[in-house]
Image (cartoon, helix red, strand yellow):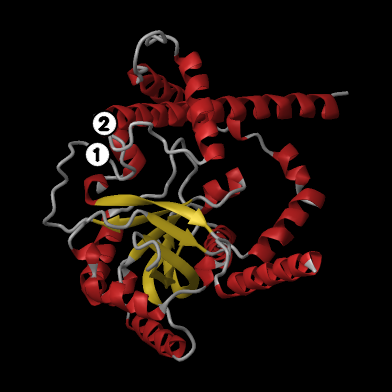
């Protein structure tokens, strides 16, 4: 009887777990659904009106990325076939602000516009384009619950040391116009800039997402660039972010896909796409080589600022301190113990903050070292495989 009751209990727990998982999608699928009431409440409150840097992240679907890249590459090919320079293209972004993580914008789809040229100002004054946008918006209202919430365009310029993903004066004029008309009505507007030529060279999508500051707003942090870094050299700021660098900021970009799509991609990568590793070496790219000294310098500065609490370790014994901090963090995670033995006391909290900063700095060291190690292994493998 006891065994029968135990089996029934196990089956009951499994059924309950399956029902819960069916009602609550996992993290991989969460971006594909949303609560309409929460979204309406977020649009109604418009918290981004009070904070010029409210949005921090952009989550883009794989289909949207593929459509943008295909469209941008078509402009490159069309311009070259005509015997001239690559052509800039443009399109609209479909999506929504995420009510679950309110500082995130979700891009679900994109729609190319019939625009070709070397400037994107045509979006504001071309009658055919405006009519096309209106007709497209009306057709989507009956089938989709998201809205047009941004625009994308390409910068198919010559590949150099820095990315061509930045906002020009024309881009800023268009973006400010969109934000002024859409943001107050619960529809925060986004700009995505793609660099198709660098994408072809690197074998990865090269794109960045931006939002413009209100023209009347002044950044309290001097020389803060769109990516949050502080660059005191004017020439370097202009090279990396253009002449409008004080007027916009960059959002972190992430990609999302369903669990089923991830499984398919994992199988493709394992069985068919492994040879791509032999076709490129990221650490040998010009951009990677130029950024390497800066990355090392920043990590060194972060480690130098770390001062272990208490006696015994000393400021120079960072590796030993890292081992101790990592052990404490791992032990606390396994046991479920609180981070600080002092509860709400300040000394324990300060100790945890130091451990956290040290862990982040050392993770950056590991990342740099791993990239170099993997790159060197790849180069040696190519030498053995292809050298007679």
Does residue 154 appear in the picture of this structure?
A: no
The spot of residue 71 in percent (x, y) is 54, 66
Give the class, few, some or many, for how many residues have Cα within 10 Å of label 2's Cα (few <14, many ≥20).
Answer: few
Farthest residue toward the left?
216
The residue indicated by pointer 1 is 224
The spot of residue 188 in percent (x, y) is 30, 68
Residue 33, which numbered label? none
Residue depicted at 26% across the width and 31% down the height: 346
Q: Where's the C terminus, which quadrant?
A: top right
The answer to whether 234 appears left or right of 260 in the picture is left
Give the class, few, some or many, for how many residues have Cα within 10 Å of label 1's Cα (few <14, many ≥20).
Answer: some
Does residue 47 appear in the picture of this structure?
A: yes
Task: Work out whether 3 lies above or below 22.
Answer: above
| Circle 1 SS class | loop
In the image, 296 versus 363, the foreground residue is 363
The image quarter in which residue 278 lies:
top right
Q: Where's the N terminus, which quadrant?
A: bottom right
């Amino acid at each position: 009887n006891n065994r029968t009751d135990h089996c029934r209990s196990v089956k009951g727990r499994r059924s309950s777990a399956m029902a819960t998982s069916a009602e609550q999608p996992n993290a991989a699928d969460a971006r594909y659904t949303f609560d309409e009431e929460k979204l309406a409440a977020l649009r109604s409150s418009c918290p981004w009106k009070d904070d010029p840097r409210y949005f921090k992240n952009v989550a883009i679907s794989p289909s949207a990325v593929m459509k943008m890249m295909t469209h941008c590459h078509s402009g490159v090919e069309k311009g070259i076939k005509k015997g001239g320079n690559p052509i800039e293209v443009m399109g609209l972004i479909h999506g929504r602000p995420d009510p679950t993580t309110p500082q995130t914008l979700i891009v679900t789809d994109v729609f190319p516009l019939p625009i070709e040229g070397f400037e994107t100002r045509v979006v504001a004054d071309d009658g055919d384009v405006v009519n096309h946008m209106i007709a497209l918006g009306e057709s989507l209202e009956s089938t989709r619950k998201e809205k047009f919430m941004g625009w994308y365009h390409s910068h198919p310029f010559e590949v150099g040391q820095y990315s061509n993903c930045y906002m020009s004066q024309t881009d800023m004029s268009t973006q400010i116009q969109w934000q002024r008309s859409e943001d107050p009505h619960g529809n925060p507007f986004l700009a995505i800039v793609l660099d198709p030529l660098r994408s072809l060279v690197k074998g990865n999508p090269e794109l960045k997402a931006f939002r413009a500051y209100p023209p009347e707003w002044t950044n309290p942090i001097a020389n803060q660039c769109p990516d949050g870094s502080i660059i005191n050299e004017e020439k370097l700021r202009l090279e990396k972010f253009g002449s409008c660098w004080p007027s916009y900021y960059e959002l972190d970009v992430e990609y999302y896909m369903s669990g089923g799509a991830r499984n398919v991609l994992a199988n493709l990568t394992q069985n068919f796409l492994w040879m791509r590793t032999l076709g490129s070496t990221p650490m040998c790219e010009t951009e990677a080589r130029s950024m390497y000294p800066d990355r090392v310098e920043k990590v060194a500065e972060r480690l130098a600022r770390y001062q272990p609490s208490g006696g015994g370790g000393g400021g120079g014994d960072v590796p030993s301190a890292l081992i101790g901090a990592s052990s404490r963090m791992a032990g606390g995670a396994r046991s479920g113990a609180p981070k600080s033995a002092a509860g709400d006391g300040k000394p324990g909290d300060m100790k945890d903050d130091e451990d956290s900063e040290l862990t982040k700095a050392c993770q950056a060291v590991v990342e740099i070292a791993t990239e170099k190690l993997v790159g060197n292994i790849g180069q040696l493998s190519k030498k053995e495989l292809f050298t007679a």
